[in-house]
Image (cartoon, grey):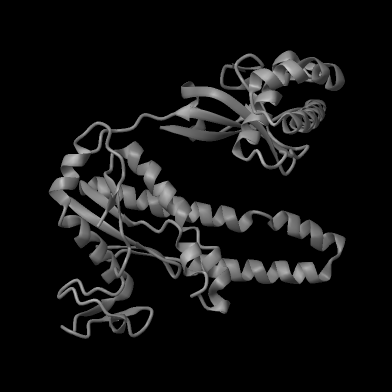
Amino acid sequence: MLQTLMVKLDPSPEQHKMLCETMERFNEACNQIAETAFAMHSANKVEIHKTVYYPVREHFGLSSQLTVRAISKVCEAYKRDKSIKPEFRLDGAIVYDQRILSWKGLEKVSLITLHGRQVIPVRFGEYQKARMDRIRGQVDLILVKGVFYLCVVVEVPEETPYDPRGVIGVDLGIKNLAVDSDGEVHSGERILSVRAKSDALKAKLQSVGTKSAKRHLRKLSGKMARFARDTNHCISKTLITKAKDTLSLISLEDLEGIGNRTVRTVQKSQRHNHSSWSFNQLREFVTYKAAIAGVPLVYIDPAYTSQECPICHCISKSNRPTRDEFCCTCCGFSGPADNVAALNIRARVEVNLPIVARFFAQPQALPFRVG
């Protein structure tokens, strides 16, 4: 599996200025190349290279390989949609390969700029340090709030999925971000509370409109996203650890496209929280952590999991008198609604567990949809 690590650069003020100038010049060149590619209606790197290579080098002063990387960046962007001309921000990423970037141990990196090669110190934690010997392919130089980072792709070994002895069903939601079939609840109340306070503060600062208010708004930018991301990392890590300790399979709902399907059914007062629900990020975290740890993972059809009784299998909207309560109108079984949904998710996989186990015994095992 390939992962991306963020490695922070620690340039001197002069080196920071050089990197900013190089980044701006690189993206200016990309915009000019994009005009040529759009006029030629071609994303062929060879044809574009023949047309723009020498004029771009002469006009923008880029090195040979930086020019090649700019052409490649434009062609890859244009391939996605040939009906529009690609446009690049002046602080957009620079793509570095092994010819124009090299590592000087684990403490420094040498990379090309408009003013020649610069050896720049790097800063990273123990997590990144343990994986820096697995670097693969190209590296992206990005600028985030005035700080330069290298996006480094590393190869992480995956464990062979084990033969599952049980199933942990996981119900995803907004009030409770994740509830498993053992009854463990990962509440979303803290995220909702922090988001409400953040939105109220941003609205107040925007209404004031002073310079200090704008500085405060810039400081708050991305804070909520980082908080939600950290929360999803913690939840996914807990689920994977629990599954591996019990040699269980994890079963998740396949919620792909749920935002488009439910946008008209959500109350107006709840639309902001619904649109801010980062269930897909949590799913991605669980997926890649499961692959690394060798934990089998499957997705199930979520239809009626919150309305079905796990005892008599009666399906009815009336089984959910409130959002938090489940009470079967046929057999009288009751319990927390999210936990009941997790039990149904587990049950749909347990029925097919022998088939699922045989599937994960194959070396090319991948998550798939059940039920």
Of residues 341 and 132, the one nearer the viewer is 341
Going 49% across and 63% down the picture, which residue do you hit? 259
Q: Position of residue 257 (x, y in %)?
A: 46, 58
Image label count: 0
User: In this image, 63 relative to 360: left or right?
Assistant: right
Query: Is residue 273 placed above or below 245 in the rendered structure?
Result: below
**Is residue 162 among what the camera can see?**
no
**Is residue 99 among what the camera can see?**
yes
Of residues 173 and 362, the one nearer the viewer is 362
Q: Position of residue 292 (x, y in %)?
A: 35, 37
Res 258 → quadrant: bottom left
User: In this image, 286 relative to 347: left or right?
Assistant: right
Q: Position of residue 8 (x, y in %)?
A: 63, 33
Q: Most extreme residue toward the left, as rendered?
A: 354
Going 13% across and 47% down the picture, which residue do you hit? 354
Going 19% across and 36% down the picture, which residue do you hit? 361
Q: Position of residue 57 (x, y in %)?
A: 80, 17
Of residues 85 and 66, the one nearer the viewer is 85
Res 118 → quadrant: top right
Query: Is residue 236 placed above or below 146 in the rendered structure?
Result: below
Point out the image quarter for the N terminus: top left
User: In this image, 369 relative to 92: left or right?
Assistant: left
Query: Is residue 289 placed above or below 16 in the rendered structure?
Result: below
Point out the image quarter for the C terminus: bottom left
User: In this image, 264 relative to 58: left or right?
Assistant: left
